[in-house]
Image (tube, rainbow, N blue to C red):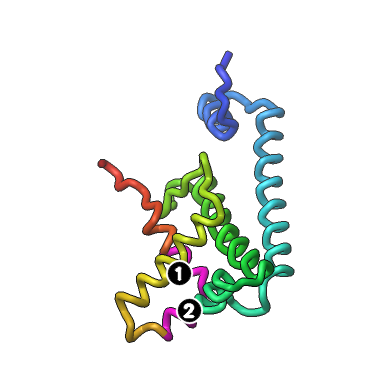
Amino acid sequence: MHRRGLDVDRGLVHATQHGCAPDADIAGAVHQVNAMTRTIAIVAIVLASTLAPAHALTSREWQDACESPDLGQQALCATYAAGVFDAMMFLQVTEPRTATTCYPTAPQPPAAQIVDVGIRHIRKAIAEFPDQRDFFRQTPVVSLLLSAFKAAWPCPSPGR
């Protein structure tokens, strides 16, 4: 009799490698997890496409929203940064071997901290390369946020 682990995928691999037919409940669980993951991804993409601006939000547009006195603009700023953070955290969890950023998951940083990391990174880039100010201001903010998050939450190097 084979001992079943908590990791469903590992249980399937173990059962298959040792000539055992995997339990139907394990195979069904794996199928349900994969189907649920695909469903969540599709729903997220559909929601993002209906809520997102028709063009890629630039660094300038995002930073202006963050610094606006209008609460709606501030909400756009915070939810955009949190959405990028959540998407990359999801990829970190589902594909840990390819993660370049090790996002804190418990406790997750508040939206204000996530926004602050992004704004500080953009300001630092402009200060270090003032002749590239227009370039940074017109760059899609998602790429600058990813760079900011990578700098703020780097993964430990293997072997250290």
**Which residue corresponds to the image point at 51% horizontal and 43% vertical from the top-left?**
105
Q: Which mark is residue 4?
A: none
Give neighbour class at mark 2: few <14, some 14-19, many 20+ (Cα, 10 Å): some
Question: Looking at the picture, how far across and down is residue 132, in whole percent?
Answer: 36, 83
**Which residue corresponds to the image point at 53% horizontal and 31% vertical from the top-left?**
10
Please report the bounds of the magenta region as a residue range. 134-147
As measured in the structure, the alpha-carbon distance from the residue carrying label 1 to the one carrying label 2 is 8 Å
Question: Looking at the picture, how far across and down is residue 124, in whole percent?
Answer: 35, 70
Vertical position of residue 117 compared to residue 110: above or below: below
Q: Please identify the quarter of the rendering in which residue 20 is found.
A: top right
Q: Residue furthest front?
A: 69
Q: State which quarter of the image contains the N terminus.
A: top right
Q: What secondary structure is found at the residue carrying circle 2? A: loop
Q: State which quarter of the image contains the C terminus.
A: top left
Judge left or right: residue 125 versus residue 41. left
Judge left or right: residue 59 versus residue 160. right
**Which residue corresponds to the image point at 49% horizontal and 49% vertical from the top-left?**
92
Residue 137 magenta-highlighted? yes
Q: Please identify the quarter of the rendering in which residue 78 is found.
A: bottom right
Q: Which mark is residue 144?
A: 1
Prevailing secondary structure class for the magenta stretch in the rendered image: helix
Please say if the residues under marks 1 and 2 sit with CB atoms less than 8 Å apart.
yes
Q: Which mark is residue 139?
A: 2
The three-letter code of the residue at mark 2 reads: Thr
The three-letter code of the residue at mark 1 reads: Leu
Residue 148 magenta-highlighted? no
First-in-chain label (1 vs 2): 2
Of the pair 50 and 91, the residue shown nearer to us? 50
**Which residue corresponds to the image point at 68% horizontal and 68% vertical from the top-left?**
72
